Image (tube, rainbow, N blue to C red):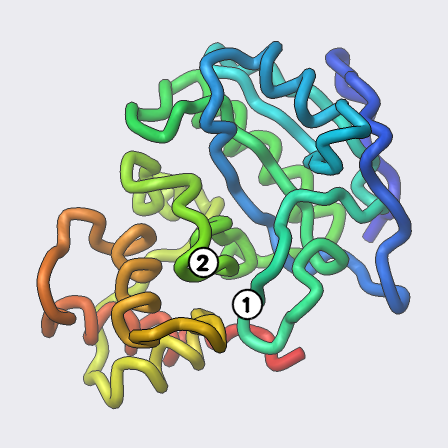
Amino acid sequence: MSAGTPDYPHRRASPNHGPRRGGARPRLILLHYTAMESAEAALARLCDPAAEVSAHYLIGTEGTVWQLVAEARRAWHAGAGAWGGIADVNSASIGIELQNRGDHPFPAPQMQALERLLQGVMARWEIGAAGVIGHSDTAVGRKRDPGPRFDWRGLARAGGAVWPDPAPPGAFLADAARAGWRAPAEAADPEAAVLAAVRLRLRPWGSGPVAAAERALVAGLAARWPAPEG
C-alpha cells in the first residue's frame, strides 16, 4: 500500500482538508454527484475556503479527472453519517465527485474514467469493491447522490463495486444494518429512511412498502459483504 497520490495532469488544489483523525486510513470510496451545471462551477465550490467542502477528485462528463486533495489527507465531502461501524466517514474514505445535476445519466467517458480512477485508488489502499459506496448509503435520509441514474450494476461488472445475488431474507432493518445502512437517530420512520437509501443503490424504480426482491438483495449483500464494524 502506498500513501502517495499519483500526479494527475489536471490539478486544482483545494484548501479544504486536514489530517485523518486517529491515524485512520482510507477503507471506503464515496461517490457523489455535484448537483451543478458545470465542472468549473463545482471546482470553484470545492476549492472555496468559505464553502468548507471538498473531495479528493472530480470527474467531468467528458472524462477529465481533477485532483483536488491528496489521498492521504481528510477531505470534507461526507458530512454526518455512518457506514456500518464507521462513524467518521471523512477520515475513512476517498471522495470522488461526478459532474452531474442528479437527474440525467452519467456519460460513458465519465464512467470509464471513474473505473480507471477506482482501479488505482483501490490498489493503493487495498480497498475491495465492497468499499465503493454512495453518499446516499452513508447519509441515509439526508443525501441522494450519486442518485437513481447511476449505474451501480454496470460499475460492479467492471470490478468497481459489488452487486448482490438474492439470499433468504431475515428482518429487513437487521439485514440492512449488517450490510451497512444506518437510519439516523432522528428518523421518524427508520424503515422508510433505510428503504429509500437501499432503493437508490439497488432498485431505484421501487415504490411502496419494502418488496420481497429488496429484502432478498439486502440479505445477499449482508451475507457476502457485511460492512466494517468499526
25 vs 217, left or right, is right
SS category of the residue bearing label 1: loop
The answer to whether 209 is drawn above or below residue 93 in the figure is below
Residue drawn at point x = 29 percent, y = 35 percent: 149
Camera-nearest residue between 225 and 77 = 77
The answer to whether 129 is drawn above or below residue 187 in the figure is above
Q: Please indicate, yes or no, whether residue 225 appears anywhere in the rendered image.
A: no
Residue drawn at point x = 49 percent, y = 53 percent: 133
90 vs 154, left or right, is right
Residue drawn at point x = 48 percent, y = 33 percent: 33
Extreme-bottom residue of the structure = 170
* Residue 161 x, y percent position in the rendering: 45, 50
Mark 1, other Cα within 10 Å: few <14 / some 14–19 / many ≥20 = many
Give the residue at mark 1: 83
* Residue 153 x, y percent position in the rendering: 30, 46
- Quadrant for residue 170, please give it: bottom left
The answer to whether 182 is drawn above or below residue 62 in the figure is below
What amino acid is labelled 1 in the image?
Trp
Alpha-carbon span between mark 1 and mark 2: 7 Å
- Label located before the other in sequence (1 or 2): 1
* Residue 23 x, y percent position in the rendering: 89, 65
Camera-nearest residue between 129 and 205 = 205
The number of numbered badges drawn on the structure is: 2
Camera-nearest residue between 89 and 185 = 185
Q: Quadrant of the C terminus?
A: bottom right
Q: Are marks 1 and 2 in contact (CB under 8 Å)?
A: yes
Residue 137 numbered tag? 2
